[in-house]
Amino acid sequence: MQQINLLQEVLFDKPQPLRSRQALLILLAVVVLAALLSLGSYWLTAGTEQRVRLISSKRDAAAAKLVELEAQYPVPVKDVLLEEKIVRLERQLRGLNQSLSSADLPNSERNAVLLKSLEGLARHPLSGVWLTRVRIGQAPGDLSMAGSALRTELVPAYLQLLRDQNILGGQVFSGLSVNRLAERPGQVDFELKGEAGGQ
């Protein structure tokens, strides 16, 4: 009977040592790879530094330009008188624009508005109040009315009626005068002046 020695070295795979050529190729590949990585890192670093220098130079140029502009155009000082004058001129300009827009209406259109107002005065009387005079000027807003009332409290009631019924188309009055009549106790005369007529 043949016996087999399991501890014999012939039965185990023996690692083969690298040949010198293979070892040299591997070493060369490692060196080339390291060189490529080093070259790429240097290229990235050089490009980044160049961009940083470019951005820094642009920032310095912008800062110098800002200093130059600040010296050339100092911060304006607030002028209270000038601001008040501007506010007054803007207010006058708004008033002139309103007058111009009213004056630009064709005569036929303005006449139609006036006729409608007069018709409204006739259609909406108030008991105890009567008009004695209605004057319409050429300028927009130049409208005045005069009348009488049996009692003082009827005057504000009549004005409320004019406003509620929009009889005068938004006409603005600058003043109201009320006079008591000594010869007729309780009765008053009143007069309304338009904005243009009251100036």
Image (spheres, rainbow, N blue to C red):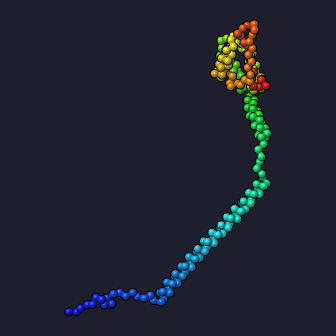
In this rendering, is residue 193 above or below 19?
above
Residue 163 position in % (x across, y down): 66, 22
Residue farthest bottom in this picture: 1
Residue 113 sits in quarter: top right
Residue occupying the point 71% across, 26% down: 109
The N terminus - image quarter: bottom left
Q: Is 65 rendered above or below residue 135? A: below
Q: How many numbered circles does the render carry? A: 0
Measured along the vertical axis of the image, is residue 59 above or below residue 151? below
Residue 53's x, y, as percent? Answer: 67, 67
* Left or right of residue 183: residue 125: left
Quadrant location, the C terminus: top right
Is residue 134 at all visible to an observer of this figure? no
For residue 46, say whether it is visible: yes
In front: 167, or 38? 38
Q: Position of residue 55 (x, y in %)?
A: 67, 64
Which of 43/168 is in front?
43
Q: Residue at x 59, y 76 (%)?
A: 39
Answer with the quarter of the image where residue 71 lies.
bottom right
Q: Percent x, y for residue 139?
A: 77, 26
Question: Residue sitting at 31 percent across and 90 percent down?
Answer: 8
Q: Residue at x 75, y 34 (%)?
A: 91
Question: In the visual, does 3 lie left or right of 189?
Answer: left
